[in-house]
Amino acid sequence: MKNLDWSSLGFGYLKTDYNVRCYYRDGKWGELEVSSQETITLHMGATCLHYGQEAFEGLKAYRGKDGKIRLFRVEENAKRMIRSAEGVVMAPVPEELFIKAVKKAVELNKDYVPPYESGASLYIRPLLLGLGEQVGVKPAPEYLFIVFVSPVGPYFKEGFKPTPMAIMRGYDRAAPLGTGTIKVGGNYAAGMVPTVLAHEKGYSACLFLDAKE
């Protein structure tokens, strides 16, 4: 286990040793690849940059009292990423491949899983990107699936204590018939301005109500 000050970790990115990658080409997913690089190479015409063909997940791994590392509901994250991929016409990552990649990323970086009752955890970020140059609005011919991890503290700096939230009624995060039911970057882009405003007013986060009503 790494010698880190686990109790002082915030919720942010901290470099670990490896990430796991897999490419979708010629209508099928390839084999898992292990990388120590933190960067990726994208064509300037990639659909993830122009047409929002991007989806991601977030889950955690914990070290138990017995020292064993456990994942929390990884199957549900795999299923949601499939729904997200289908929602923006990307090649879905099969559930079995998703779980295999997540477990491999955790195993490769097991020294970064915080100790039991440290208040920290290993955050896992699966990411799906549309690759290949497209000028017209159409699905990408290739996709890249990445899983990287980072040890983190509580999402809110207050930890498990009550935290103030703001309802910003002048903004909607997702249109009723749009992408609100899936986990894609565009939803977060739509919520960026009100979230920043909420932080400036001293709130921890912004709550978005039913946009239709």
Image (cartoon, rainbow, N blue to C red):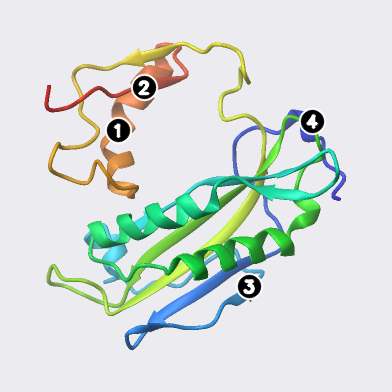
Q: Which residue is mark 4?
A: 117
Mark 1 or mark 2: whose residue is earlier in sequence: 1
Q: Which residue is mark 1?
A: 191
Q: Which residue is mark 3?
A: 35
Task: Determine the CA span between mark 4 and mark 1.
Answer: 33 Å
The reply to whether callout 3 and callout 2 are in contact (CB within 8 Å) is: no
Mark 4 or mark 1: whose residue is earlier in sequence: 4
**Tag shown at residue 206:** 2
Q: Residue at x 63, y 29 (%)?
A: 154
Task: Determine the CA span between mark 1 and mark 3.
Answer: 32 Å
Mark 4 or mark 2: whose residue is earlier in sequence: 4
Q: Residues within 10 Å of mark 2 (few under 14, many from 20)?
A: many
**The residue under label 4 is which amino acid type?**
Glu
Mark 3 or mark 2: whose residue is earlier in sequence: 3
Q: Nearer the viewer, residue 154 or 37?
A: 154
The reply to whether callout 1 and callout 2 are in contact (CB within 8 Å) is: yes
Task: Determine the CA span between mark 4 and mark 3.
Answer: 30 Å
SS assignment at label 4: loop
Q: Residues within 10 Å of mark 3 (few under 14, many from 20)?
A: some
**The residue under label 2 is which amino acid type?**
Cys
